[in-house]
Amino acid sequence: TYANKRILSTKSIDLMESVQTHQAKIEFMPAGAKSSLQYGLGNWCEEADRAGKCDIVSSPGALGTYPWIDRRNDLYGVFFMRRRLPFVEKEIQAARRIITQAVKNPRHVVGYSVPQEVGIASVASSAEIP
């Protein structure tokens, strides 16, 4: 919503966050991205259920911004990086695992230091996302 007005319908968002590529050959993937990615409409589908509904979507940018939504765990966030994705993908995925673990069970988080190349700008509950 913007100014209390809905911009995209729930149906539109559901379509955007559904696997569109299925078994098609994907010609281009971001450098450093997991080879198991599928594509929705305007975003990568990192994990999907059997019906093709994306549980985790992201859209890593070429110049260091990495937004993601994890519907399964009710989280979303944005990473800003000083380095390109191939050099920090492992650290980003590790940070996301730590964030998910912290939200699920905040008293049992194993210590983790986020490298300077990856900055956590925002992580929040996705209750505000349709």
Image (spheres, rainbow, N blue to C red):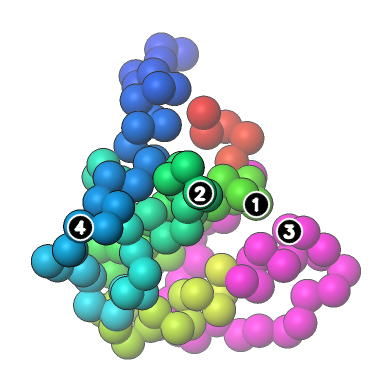
Give, as a three-letter code, the residue at label 1: Asn
The residue wearing badge 1 is 73
Q: CA distance from mark 3 to mark 4?
A: 35 Å
Classify 83 as above or below 36.
below
State the residue lying farthest toward the left. 27
The residue wearing badge 2 is 50
Relative horizontal placement of residue 115, taking residue 42 as reference (left or right): right
- Count of residue discs: 4
What residue sits 30% from the left and 52% below the top? 22
Relative horizontal placement of residue 85, taking residue 123 as reference (left or right): left
Q: Of callouts 1 and 4, which one flags the residue occurring earlier in the amino acid sequence? A: 4
Mark 3 and mark 1 residues within 8 Å of each other at the beta carbon = yes
The residue wearing badge 3 is 103
Q: Provide the residue span drawn in magenta.
A: 97-125
Camera-near label (3 vs 4) is 4
Mark 4 and mark 2 residues within 8 Å of each other at the beta carbon = no
Camera-near label (1 vs 2) is 2
The residue wearing badge 4 is 24
Give the x, y percent position of residue 23. 27, 58
Circle on res. 119: none
For the question of whether residue 116 can be seen, the reply is yes
Q: CA distance from mark 1 to mark 2?
A: 17 Å
State the residue lying farthest toward the right. 107
Q: Residues within 10 Å of mark 1 (few under 14, many from 20)?
A: some
Q: Of callouts 1 and 2, which one flags the residue occurring earlier in the amino acid sequence? A: 2
